[in-house]
Amino acid sequence: DYIIGADDLLEIDVFQAEELHKSVRVSSQGYISMALIGDLKAKGLTPGQLEQQISKKLEKYMIEPRVSVGIKEYKAEKIGVIGSVKNPQMYIVTGQRYLLDMLTLAGGITGDAGEICYILRPADSDKPGTTKVETLVINLDELLVKGDFSLNLPVFSGDVINIPRSGIVFVDGPVNRPGPFPYKLKMTPREAIITAGGQRFEADPTDVKIVRDKGDGTREVISINYEAITNGKSPDVSVKENDIIVMGTNGLKDFFNNFFGFLRGSVSTGGSMTLTPGIPVR
């Protein structure tokens, strides 16, 4: 339901009481004024909640008053969307908007978006003349991937939606391009290893480790079978920001890879060596 805000124009009607039918604008402090009732705070309430408040006040003068509250004119609201979206800017909107509405207006998130979204909201401060900021944290993976729409929070004038850039994942071991790579939402070890150029000959795809910082100064090591994942025999897992993915090394393959590399180097430099019978050289 729409949340009434300052400067909204409300249409209030009381059944069989024409004198109480009126259009009233919510003051900058959030109040409306009505005959018989006086001042009543409307800001922060839904139309239905305001209807109940007015009905209670009118029970002194009427039997079972029936009240309806409509929004005749919405105040134009400014809501900022910044960070990893296609069109970051301040948006002027009317009516109740939600987080997904604003992400859609901003063209959607970009590929380098992290999995956390922050809603920065001005809040009343204990000190007169000052404003403090309330920070709401939304997990985009839970909202966009798993469909938890309880996280699709309503947003209001003055809110700033910030989607920071993602962190990195580091891929090491026998891969073609070891090093850090930008973390992407929903990234898996398979995607990370492909981004690193794929595995080399001496890799052991059955022995892959994910080293993850637990946030308390310690790390956990998660073992996965990359070969089983690529063959569809085992489900893929999720990678988190700042994970280190280490591809295992097959000792025998590594030996032959180094050995034949040594042979090629010796031949190219014109060196002489004695070959052991029984070992083919290609």
Image (spheres, rainbow, N blue to C red):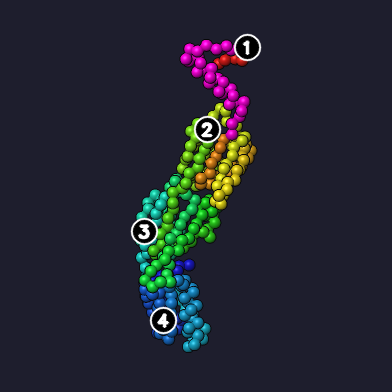
Can you see residue 24?
A: yes
- Mark 3 sits on what residue? 91
Q: Does residue 93 show up magenta in the picture?
A: no
Which sits earlier in the primary sequence, circle 1 or circle 3?
3
Are there few (<14), some (14-19), or many (20+) residues within 10 Å of tag 4? few
Which sits earlier in the primary sequence, circle 1 or circle 2?
2
How many tags in the picture?
A: 4
Which sits earlier in the primary sequence, circle 2 or circle 4?
4
Q: Give the range drawn in magenta.
A: 248-277
What numbered label is drawn on residue 175?
A: 2
Residue at 40% across / 59% down in the picture? 160
Q: Does residue 250 show up magenta in the picture?
A: yes
Residue at 45% across / 71% down in the picture? 44
Task: Please tell me whether mark 1 or mark 4 is closer to you in this view.
Answer: 1
Secondary structure of residue under mark 2: loop
Nearer-the-camera pick, 114 or 242: 242
Which sits earlier in the primary sequence, circle 3 or circle 4?
4
Judge whether 226 appears above or below 87 on screen. above
* Position of residue 188 measured from the top left corner of the image (x, y, whole percent): 54, 42
- Mark 4 sits on what residue? 39
* Position of residue 7 measured from the top left corner of the image (x, y, whole percent): 36, 72
- Mark 1 sits on what residue? 277
Task: Please tell me whether mark 2 or mark 4 is closer to you in this view.
Answer: 2
Are there few (<14), some (14-19), or many (20+) residues within 10 Å of tag 1? few
Secondary structure of residue under mark 4: strand
